[in-house]
């Protein structure tokens, strides 16, 4: 698997438009601090299963905590005054959480969101300040 350190034009060319124009879906691995864009033809849950080398969604549903370190994040870009600009960053909720009931700690959600921000800040596109929308979504469970 290829990991990316910044939001580049190449990523936009190959991974944007997953659910709507300008939207890029990511998986942030908070253990090793890596980020992978999700191909627009794949659902989050299926991509996470492939990262974990699981045969099916059912395997993940039986043991959802094995994916707790893999956190979804979305970046949305749109053209502002002729320049493609990051306008939204969301972290924490995807089909993995809804279907397989994967939970993340609040601390990990915050780490993933920070890593997504750094991914954008190190990239080729400006970040709208303030963003149109930004959120850490979903339920979380703190470590026991």
Image (spheres, grey):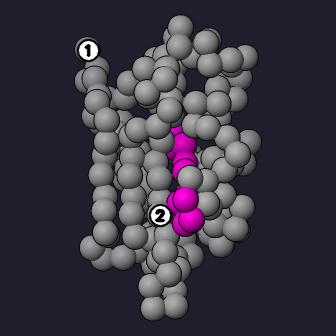
**Cα distance in 3D space between marks 1 and 2:** 34 Å
For image coordinates 39% across by 58% down, the residue present is 89
Judge the density around disc 1: few (<14), some (14-19), many (≥20) Cα neighbours within 10 Å: few
Tell me the residue at 68%/17% (across/down): 56
The answer to which image quadrant residue 107 occupies is top left
Q: Give residue 128's quadrant in the image.
A: bottom left
Q: Is residue 32 something one can see in this rendering?
A: no
* Highlighted range, magenta: 20-32
**Camera-side residue of 19 and 77:** 19
On the image, the x and y values in percent for residue 35 come to 57, 48
- Relative to 45, residue 114 above or below: below
The mark found on residue 125 in the picture is none
Q: Which residue has dot 2 on it?
A: 76
User: Could you say which disc has been placed on residue 144 in the image?
Assistant: 1
* Residue at left offset 61%, top offset 60%: 17
Q: Quadrant of residue 24?
A: bottom right
Question: Is residue 128 shown above or below 139?
Answer: below
- Residue at position x 35%, y 39% in the image: 109
Residue 26 in the magenta stretch? The answer is yes
Q: Residues within 10 Å of mark 2 (few under 14, many from 20)?
A: many
Quick check: 11 above or below 67?
below
Question: Of the residues tagged 1 and 2, which is closer to the observer?
Answer: 2
Q: Nearer the viewer, residue 35 or 50?
A: 50
């Amino acid at each position: 698997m290829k990991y990316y350190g910044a939001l580049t034009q190449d990523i936009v060319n190959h991974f944007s438009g997953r659910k709507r124009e300008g939207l890029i879906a990511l998986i942030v691995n908070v253990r090793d601090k890596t980020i992978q864009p999700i191909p627009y033809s794949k659902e989050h849950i299926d991509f996470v299963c492939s990262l974990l080398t699981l045969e099916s969604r059912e395997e993940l549903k039986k043991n959802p905590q094995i994916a707790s370190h893999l956190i979804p994040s979305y970046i949305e870009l749109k053209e502002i005054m002729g320049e493609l600009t990051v306008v939204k960053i969301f972290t924490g909720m995807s089909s993995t959480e809804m279907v397989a009931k994967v939970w993340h700690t609040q601390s990990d959600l915050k780490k993933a969101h920070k890593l997504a921000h750094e991914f954008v800040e190190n990239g080729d596109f400006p970040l709208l300040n303030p963003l149109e929308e930004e959120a850490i979504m979903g339920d979380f469970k703190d470590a026991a």
